[in-house]
Image (cartoon, rainbow, N blue to C red):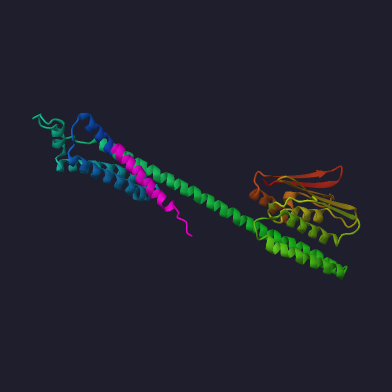
Amino acid sequence: MTTLSLRPYVSPLIHVLVWGLLGFLLLLYWPLSWQASGQFMLPIQFWIKQGILFCLLVGIFYLNAYVWVPRFLFQNRNGWFLVIALTASLALVFFVQQVDAWLNLPELIHKALHPDSNEPPRPRKVFDNYNFMLTLLVLGISTSVKAVQKWQKDAQLRLSLEQQKTSSELSFLKAQINPHFFFNTLNNIYILTTIDVEIARQALHRLSRMMRYVLYETQKDTTLLSQEVSFLQDYIELMQLRLTDKVEVIFESPPVLNDVLLAPMLFLPFVENAFKHGVSAQLPSRIHIAIHQQGPVLQLEVRNTKFNEKRMVLDESNGIGLTNTRRRLNLLYPHHYDLQVNEDKTENEYQVCLTLDLS
């Protein structure tokens, strides 16, 4: 069953209503009230002239809106626009005065006002100020309406372009993160093949499961929190395969997750950074990863050992993952996230805390 949309008819209906109201107030109300108070009948020629004037005003309204304003005013040819507007107003006034003379309207109105008088009608006005001001008013309304429409159209265009730019930038950032992740992971598996082939096979199996998530789930704008947590668990276990007993890795997540939607692979760069910079082959190391959830607020906390020989500045990371993640946060969650990066010198620890308000 098809539904009838009223949108195509709304704009013409508004025009009809507006012109009906303006035509009544400007061209009919004053003569009718004048006729009612004076107890006389205006000649039919007067209403013919009013009808011609009304048609001329409608014509000049749309001619100005669809021809003069776009071709002259919007093209910064303001002088030509003013000349055309004034010339059209003067031409309309002159034409209406010729219609008055052709219909012999001054004499007919004089007879209607003074039926018993033999005095000749007063001389016709050289210039009709009322019709001139009325024409300028119509031109002003026409110009204002067209200017507002152009402003709205330009605002919608700017919004559309900004949305397209944001969408393109997010796609570019996400496309950068995925190869970055696989490059590092495959390097780790390559190292494992030289140490233990069986462990390397397990790592490849786990990586294939992660690849399904990256290839299918990350193509969407959002993913479930439970899927993101499972992906992090797989990644952490994959990284642990190549670590020694000197490295302590703790991962905490809520026993019961409220499955909210968030951007995919948003947490990975912070965890990846901890494994990249917080592990030493000779010294004891520790990595603590925790996910907390309270209502719509989600928090990721990553703490890892800080080694003096390793550079741990988030914004100046040699990798692209962390820099892109900060940019993604600015685009996806503006004013709805808080990212704290600290160095605890007493504990010799590097700390990252990301808080997201997903309400």
Give the residue displayed 16% in from the left and 31% down from the top: 113
Q: Nearer the viewer, residue 309 or 276?
A: 276
Q: Farthest residue in the left direction?
A: 118
- Left or right: 24, with 355 as reference point: left
- The image quarter in which residue 207 lies: bottom right
- The image quarter in which residue 355 lies: top right
Q: Farthest residue in the front direction?
A: 1
Name the spot of residue 337 as percent of width and height, x first.
Answer: 69, 45
Q: Is residue 19 magenta?
A: yes
Name the spot of residue 20 as percent of width and height, x first.
Answer: 32, 43
Q: Main secondary structure of the magenta part?
A: helix
Specify whether residue 143 is in view: yes
Q: Nearer the viewer, residue 17 or 282?
A: 17
- Left or right: 73, with 238 as reference point: left
Q: Is residue 328 magenta?
A: no
- The image quarter in which residue 176 lies: bottom right
Q: How many marks?
A: 0
The quadrant of the picture occupied by the C terminus is top right
Answer above or below: position of 234 versus 43.
below
Answer above or below: position of 261 versus 138.
below
Give the residue displayed 87% in from the left and 44% down from the top: 347
Name the spot of residue 94 as percent of width and height, x first.
Answer: 21, 42
Give the residue displayed 73% in from the left and 50% down from the top: 258
Specify whether residue 94 is in view: no
- Left or right: 261, with 127 as reference point: right
**Range drawn in magenta:** 1-26
Q: Nearer the viewer, residue 233 or 347?
A: 233
Name the spot of residue 191 as percent of width and height, x first.
Answer: 83, 66
